[in-house]
Amino acid sequence: MGLITSVICVFLLIYFIYYFANYFQKINSPRSYPLIGHASIMKPDAEGFISQIMGMGYLYPDAPRMVLFWIGTMPVLMLYSAPLVEKILTSSKHLGKGFAYNLLEPWLGQGIITSNVNNWRPKRKLLTPTFHYDMLKGFVPIFNEQSRILVRKLANLPKKEPVELLSFITLCGLDIICETSMGRTINAQLDKESDYVWAVHTINDLVQKRTKNPIMWNDFIYENGKLEKKCLDILHSFTRSVISERREELEEGGWRFNGRLAFLDLMLDLARRGLLDSTDIHSQLRPVDTLMFAGHDTTSTGASWALYLLGCYPETQRKAQAEIDEVLGESDYVTVEHLPHLKYLECCLKESLRIYPSVPMIMRELNADQEIEGVIVPKGTQLVINQFLVHRDPTYWQDPEDFNPDRFLPENTVGRHAFAFIPFSAGSRNCMGQRFIFSNLNMRSKVEIILRPTDGIHVVLERRRPVL
């Protein structure tokens, strides 16, 4: 009986492999092997794996700009042309996230990033109004306060010595996202050794490395399970205590919101009105944790890359600084009213996000068979949408490796494909907080899942005026 079972299993496995192989035989793909796919040539380390994924795109640079690779017996189709990406991201059939997002569930649960389509739709509808203009306007003082702390810390560093900028901006971003999401000041810039700051940085690093190393996707093989649990215990304990304290404060105050309105306040108000489960703290915990994950690292890396590129291109930096001086005058306080007038700075930020998108790739799972370039791709196939390579498509970007903010001047964007620039994804399941992120970038630029530099970002700073 055991022999018969083994034979049947082997037969079904072989049938499964050839079934999928026949579907994909017309698609570009490096040579693979039965059962192991491309595992024999894939780098086991995170940086090597991600470089190989990018390299597959450069191996097939011409239309239709898609390539197939196999992780064991699982086919993964990578798309990196604007028309193909548009077909997937605008389809109401393919809103399911790829399997790799399951690795975030221990931290984020079934949040807005990780939830399946049936759970995602009502959550998206419920949470989208919380990112309205008035709420973002209320965060501006926080952006300014924390940016001042950042500038003062940078001003106290040795003059004309290289500075690893990302670590400073990451702490600033953490202070901003904690205060805007939970209404609590954690003083990460002043106390970077706190347990909470350590846990946030550590869990981010663990998630980054695990998502880029297929060997570690299996829970039994994953070597950092205990360290991850320690981080999660700290993070969830802190968030739970903040939720409990804030609920008590609001109940004692008759649910009158005075002063700044944090994202958590909106979650608790939704629970009070019966729109979230008020008895289940996880329903309030997950949105806050999701904002922490999605907000601080993406913004910090985005701002760091932008400052790095401005340092590499002095003439562009001078133009951006001249615009800031003209709009702000002698003031060092940025308001929402200033932002629409910082047009060239916005071009600089967009061009930085084009070259170094904070999220270089996203995943989708096909929820139905889909025709792509004459090939019927079967339901259940994992798709990788590679923004990094879409942003470097010479069809839409002349000299794509060059930093040229003029690409985003209004006269130069006419006729460009709408999906040639998608730093925050696109379609129905795009980033809800992109306005928050862009406002945050504007504020601070005045002074892997996330695309982070391996060895940090080193710049030399020069003071232009006294620091207040």
Image (cartoon, grey):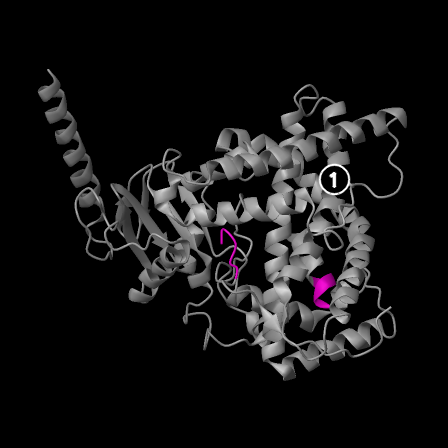
Query: For the point 73% across and 69% down, which residue is it?
Result: 342
Q: Please, which residue is most extreme toward the top here?
A: 1
To which residue does mark 1 refer?
Answer: 182
The front one of 373 and 334 is 334
- Residue 242, can we see it? yes
Q: Regarding mark 1 in the picture, which secondary structure is present there? A: helix
Look at label 1 and name its amino acid. Met
- Residue 280: x and y in percent read 65, 21
Query: For the point 12% across and 18% down, which residue is it?
Result: 2
112 lies left or right of 101: right
* Magenta stretch in the rendered image: 442-452
- Residue 318: x and y in percent read 69, 82
284 lies left or right of 20: right
Q: Identify whether 100 is placed above or below 442.
A: above
Residue 442, image quadrant: bottom right
The front one of 426 and 154 is 154
252 lies left or right of 151: right
- Residue 36: x and y in percent read 22, 45
Our reading of the magenta stretch's main secondary structure is loop
407 lies left or right of 225: right
Q: Is residue 33 magenta?
A: no
The front one of 378 and 203 is 203
Circle 1 Cα neighbour tier, 10 Å, few/some/many (<14 / 14–19 / ≥20):
many
